[in-house]
Amino acid sequence: MMMFDLSGKVAVVTGGSRGIGRSICEQMAAHGARVVVSSRKLPACEEVVKAIEAGGGEATAVAASISDRGQLENLVTTARKTYGKIDIMVCNAATNPYFGPLTGLKEDVFQKIMMNNVMSNLWLMNMVGPEMAERRDGAFIIVSSIGALVGSAHIAAYNMSKAADLSLVKSLAMEWGRHNIRVNAIAPGLIQTDFAKALWDNPQIRSAQENKAALKRIGQPDDIGGVAVFLASKAAAFICGQCIIADGGVIGSGAE
């Protein structure tokens, strides 16, 4: 038995058109899964589908905004119509519209962050959970952040939402684990993506992160894509309700 083989599995990935999400789509496809690539913009998803197909994989694109429950329901329905089922759900899409101190955080912005980064994940679990429970097999993965574990003077609201995701994972694991659905989180450190550009493009912040990291570098999308493959595979059959930190050794390095 190949422990990391995802052949026969169907994976749905939100925020799948670039960065970490694109890597997760490509790596899952490379390990045999049929992948539904989703983000707000269809052409960007279709580009990832073409790349997967060029590599011999199978994928389809479905546009959906995580802020719209109806669009997420359509995503799940279309995935089932296309491939018959959903085995792996990866909630990677997130919002961070505010960079600055909590003193300047507007209530509507905070509500948007919490709805998009937390509530949408609960919606998706409740949409895909029953079908997975029926088959007694499923993997549900939320991409959180090491921001969930630390304070921040710049992205506190985002960090709060990611901390809420870690708590959500533990409770969803308690609810769905009895049906052999494994619910886990990944907490990436600073990864070189468009989403995190404001951080790694800032020489001071980047250099501080590199110095803090035991590996002395920031991450690349494939550093996270492989972790998602692991959590979706038989190799992680006994992992549930956990958070895997993939940050190059920033948390716990002891560096100040």
Image (cartoon, grey):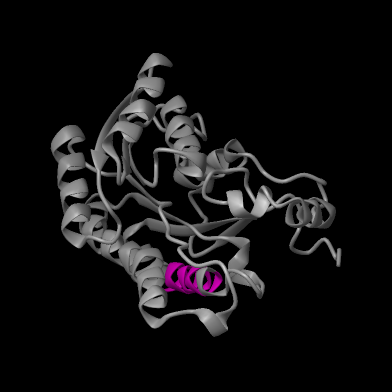
Is residue 211 visible from the viewing direction of this image?
yes
* Part of the protein shown in magenta: 159-171
**Which of 155/31 is in front?**
155
Residue sitting at x 51%, y 40%: 19
Specify the quadrant of the image occupied by residue 70.
bottom left
**Which of 177/153 is in front?**
153
Q: Is residue 250 above or below residue 114?
A: above
Residue sitting at x 45%, y 37%: 22
Q: Could you tell me residue 136's position as x and y percent?
A: 29, 53
Q: Is residue 29 left or right of residue 211?
A: left
Residue sitting at x 57%, y 39%: 221
Specify the quadrant of the image occupied by residue 217.
top right
- In the rendered image, the residue lying farthest to the bottom is 103
Is residue 246 visible from the viewing direction of this image?
no
Residue 160 belongs to magenta span: yes
Q: Is residue 114 left or right of residue 223?
A: left
Residue sitting at x 52%, y 35%: 3
Q: Could you tell me residue 206's position as x and y percent?
A: 74, 51
Residue 92 belongs to magenta span: no
Q: Could you tell me residue 255's position as x and y percent?
A: 86, 63
Q: Could you tell me residue 53's position as x and y percent?
A: 35, 18
Q: Is residue 247 above or below residue 169?
A: above
Question: Which secondary structure type mostly characterizes the magenta part of the structure?
Answer: helix
Q: Quadrant of the C terminus?
A: bottom right
Q: Is residue 139 above or below residue 57?
A: below
**Which of 246/209 is in front?**
209
